[in-house]
Structures are given as C-alpha cells and as structure tokens.
Amino acid sequence: MTPLDWLALVHPVLMILFVYPVVGATIRLGILVRERRLGIHPLPPTVGEEHTAHGRWLTSAVVLLVLIALAVVLLGAPGGLGLLVAAPRRLGGLLLLVAVAMGGVLALWRPQRSSARALLALLAWGALLILVAQPEVRQLGSNPFGGLGWGSHALSGVLLCGLLLFSMAAAPDTLRWPRMRRLHQLAGLVTGLLLAVQAITGARDLLALPLRR
Ligand code: HEM
Ligand code: HEM
C-alpha cells in the first residue's frame, strides 16, 4: 500500500462509516418532521432542528469526501503530482476551486440571507462541477442522457452534491414556505435514490480499480 492508496481508502471508508449512517438518521428524522406536522404522532419540535443539524453534517461530509476522492484521482493520474507542480497556474486554480467548494458549504452553517445562501450553494456546486470536469476524472460518457452517463459515479455524485447543497441553502425557507417544503421533499426523494446509486457504482469502481491499474 502506497501513501496514495491509503488516501484513496479515506473516501469509501468514511462514506460507509460516517455518511451512510447519518443518511439513515436524517431520513428517519425527516419522516418524523412530516408526522409531527401532520399531527400523526405527538412529537417534540426538536425533531426539525435535529433533522436540519444532521442534514448540515451530511452535506459538509459529502463535499469534503468528494474533494478527497477528486484529489486522489488527480494525484493518481499518469504524471500525478509532478505534472500538477509543473503547471503552477493550473495547480493554483484547482486549489482555489477546492477552497471555494469547502468554504461555500462551511459558510452555509452560519445564518445568512436567502440570496447569500443561494449564491454560496451555487458557488460551491460550480466549483465541484469544474473539478469533476477535469480530464483526469473518468466520466464514462459525459452526456448524462446517454446510456453510460447514468453509470458514472462522478456525474451522479456531483448531482447529489448539488441537491444536498440546495437542501442546506433552502433550509430556513423550507420551514417558512409550503412550496419550498414540497421542493425539498422532491429533492430529498431524488437524493435518497442517488445515494443508493452512489453505493452501487462506488462498490463497482472499487472492484474495477485493480483492473484499471
Ligand atoms: C437524505 C436527504 C433528506 C431527506 C430524505 C429529507 C426529507 C425531509 C422530509 C420528509 C421533511 C418533512 C417535510 C414535511 O413536513 O412534510 C423534511 C423537512 C426539512 N428538511 Fe429535510 N431531508 C433531507 C435532507 C435535508 C438537508 C440536507 C437539510 C438541510 C441542511 C434539510 C432541512 C430540512 C428542513 C429545514 C425541514 C423542515 C423542518 C421543520 O419543519 O421543522 N433536509 N426533510
Ligand atoms: C454520497 C455518496 C458518494 C458520492 C457523492 C461520491 C462521489 C465520488 C466522486 C465525485 C468521485 C471522484 C470521481 C470518480 O473517480 O468517479 C468518487 C470516487 C470514488 N468513489 Fe465515491 N462517492 C460516494 C460514495 C461512495 C461509496 C459508498 C463508495 C464505495 C463503497 C465509493 C467509492 C469510490 C471509489 C473507489 C472512487 C475512486 C474511483 C476511481 O479511482 O476511479 N464512493 N466518488
């Protein structure tokens, strides 16, 4: 195992150990929020706060682990770190994108106006989109409407990040506006499906790694 192999383990291991258990708790708490609102069970108002807190941790952890996976892909490409260091402007640009993605999601932890939250989420997602579009990242057919696009761990992963960032940015409005609540329910459903897709394509990519090396 090289140091890069150990770093490559961080993404799948922490997804399994941290992210997916938090996903389970977030979905359960979301269902409780709904049951409380509809008066199905007498539940404390804290279920909403708990669900939002879990959602924040989930979104931040997914963005961080995606950045680590992308760093591994870039460092593991032919030429690796040497090629990146030889092109300092590109390296600087990539590091700036990493800072914008992580900084954007962390800034969403603080109370902000709706417009500022939307801008932060868009900036963070835009930075992730540019990082995933780097030539070193395997997109398995870059057209999401083509057959292979749906099998791409990278494309569905970045879409999932966008949905989580949307839920995090829209959280205060989800509490206030029924229309935003319905949009959040739809986003939550697609997020759940994409999390299952990521588990399948991620496990497939782990199996295929030795074949590609
Ligand atoms: C797996 C992802 C998620 C699912 C499946 C999900 C699901 C739900 C559901 C079912 C509700 C109840 C809606 C209703 O009242 O009918 C809800 C409410 C809510 N969700 Fe999520 N959610 C997810 C992620 C997130 C994230 C990432 C955040 C923000 C960080 C978030 C923030 C909220 C807020 C603020 C509410 C309203 C809480 C309240 O009324 O007290 N959710 N969610
Ligand atoms: C929230 C769920 C997940 C998201 C958003 C996500 C996203 C990503 C992204 C964007 C990449 C870099 C692009 C690529 O190489 O495809 C990546 C790489 C990778 N992911 Fe995930 N992932 C998730 C869950 C998982 C899980 C559960 C596993 C394993 C069980 C996994 C295994 C991998 C592996 C092995 C790679 C490197 C593949 C390679 O070198 O080509 N991922 N992931």
Image (spheres, grey):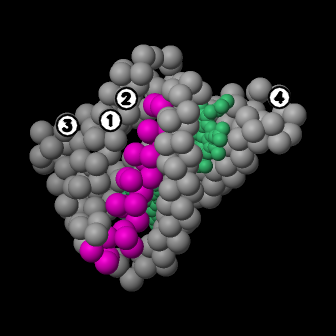
Q: Is residue 68 above or below residue 203?
A: above
Q: Residue furthest bottom?
A: 211
Q: Are marks 1 and 3 in contact (CB under 8 Å)?
A: no
Q: Which residues are magenta?
A: 146-171
Q: Are marks 3 and 2 in contact (CB under 8 Å)?
A: no
Q: Residue furthest right?
A: 42
- Please name the amino acid that badge 1 sits on: Leu
Q: Is residue 141 above or below residue 24?
A: below
- What residue does disc 4 label? 44
- What residue does disc 2 label? 118
Marked residue nearer the N-terminal end (1 or 4): 4
Marked residue nearer the N-terminal end (3 or 2): 3
- What residue does disc 1 label? 122
Q: CA distance from mark 4 to mark 3?
A: 48 Å
Marked residue nearer the N-terminal end (4 or 2): 4
Q: Residue at x 34, y 60 (%)?
A: 155
State ligand 2's quadrant. bottom left
Q: Are marks 1 and 2 in contact (CB under 8 Å)?
A: yes
Q: Marks 3 and 2: which is nearer the front?
A: 2
- What residue does disc 3 label? 92
Number of residues whose C-alpha sits closer than 10 Å to that of mark 3, classed few (under 14), some (14–19) or many (20 or more):
few
